[in-house]
Amino acid sequence: MADEIPALGTDENKEYRFRQLHGKTLRFQVKAAHDCHVAFTTGAEETDPMVEVFIGGWEGAASAIRFKKADDLVKVDTPDIVTEAEYREFWIAVDHNEVRVGKGGEWEPLMQAPIPEPFEITHYGYSTGWGATGWWKFLNDRVLNTEDCLTYNFEPVYGDSISFSVACSNDAHLALASGPEETTPMYEIFIGGWENQHSAIRLNKDGKGDDMAKVETPDVVCTEEERKFLVSFRNGQIKVGYKDTDPFLEWTDPEPWKVSRGQVRSSLC
């Protein structure tokens, strides 16, 4: 079960409100007549370099990705892509030195562009402008409470990585699937399994699961504090580690497939 997502308002002054970016994919819902702007920076302010994403700009007629407040890297026609009548969901991935922007529920981006001068993105800002005000809900803010029932509840994955924090005594499990249910094939990542002594990557295929990689990770999770992890899975190369450190567990699938759903479950949280 997820906690309610707070709604954050923006005025028409085109001033970014900055927050720390956790992970490489930003998911959000926005309600505005036009001109929903998101900036990606190296700090909690406008920086050089900076990437900007405009959704429903030009009076709602087009969307674009811009670098260093200069020329647009890409611009596409997107009439009526946003509205002040209802929230609409979008995702922005900023991994592998490129930017990809898409609609919620659609895995193919509506626009994408390489970052001309790659830089370390740590924050994002959001704003509205040119006469539009808005309301935003960032899905990355959700707190998900899981029971000790070993049941996955799947939701979309749009980038090639998942960043999350978890507090539990043992057995934080992440499933990566190709649909909104347990599928075959399916990857499972066990963090702090075997009484919080080991972690593993399991491939479920043809009705059976085999551990493809398993390492000792004593006390890797803890009930007293939330610990941050990053799991990446580009082209079947799965890496698991604490956020901002080298992975402690990895494996490459010789027959990779496209991950489109993911879910964390845990035991005794």
Image (cartoon, rainbow, N blue to C red):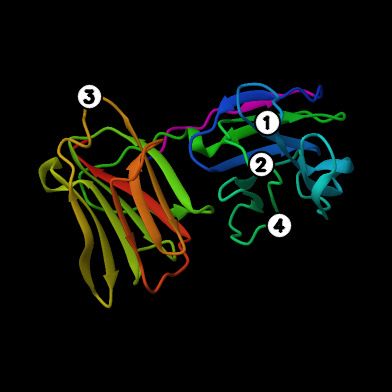
Residue appearing at x 21%, y 29% in the figure:
223
Query: Against 243, is 107 above or below?
Result: below
Q: Quadrant of residue 67?
A: top right
| Discs 1, 2 touching: Cβ within 8 Å | yes
The numbered dot on residue 230 is: none
* Mark 4–mark 3 distance (CA, rounded to whole Å): 42 Å
Q: Which residues are magenta?
A: 2-11
Q: Is residue 49 left or right of residue 227?
A: right
Residue in the foreground of this view, choosing between 65 and 185: 65
* Mark 4–mark 2 distance (CA, rounded to whole Å): 18 Å
Residue pointed to by mark 4: 110
**Kind of element beneath mark 1:** strand
Closer to the chain start, of discs 1 and 2, is: 2
Residue appearing at x 27%, y 78% in the figure:
206
Q: Is residue 157 left or right of residue 231?
A: right
* Mark 2–mark 3 distance (CA, rounded to whole Å): 36 Å
Q: What amino acid type should be assigned to the residue bearing mark 4? A: Leu
Residue pointed to by mark 1: 135
**Kind of element beneath mark 4:** loop
Closer to the chain start, of discs 2 and 3, is: 2
Closer to the chain start, of discs 4 and 1, is: 4
Q: Quadrant of residue 253?
A: bottom left
* Mark 1–mark 2 distance (CA, rounded to whole Å): 8 Å
Q: What amino acid type should be assigned to the residue bearing mark 2? A: Tyr
Residue pointed to by mark 3: 224
Q: Quadrant of the N terminus?
A: top left
Residue in the foreground of this view, choosing between 30 and 24: 24
Badge 1, how many Cα within 10 Å: few under 14, some, many 20+? many
Q: x, y (%) of residue 181?
A: 38, 63
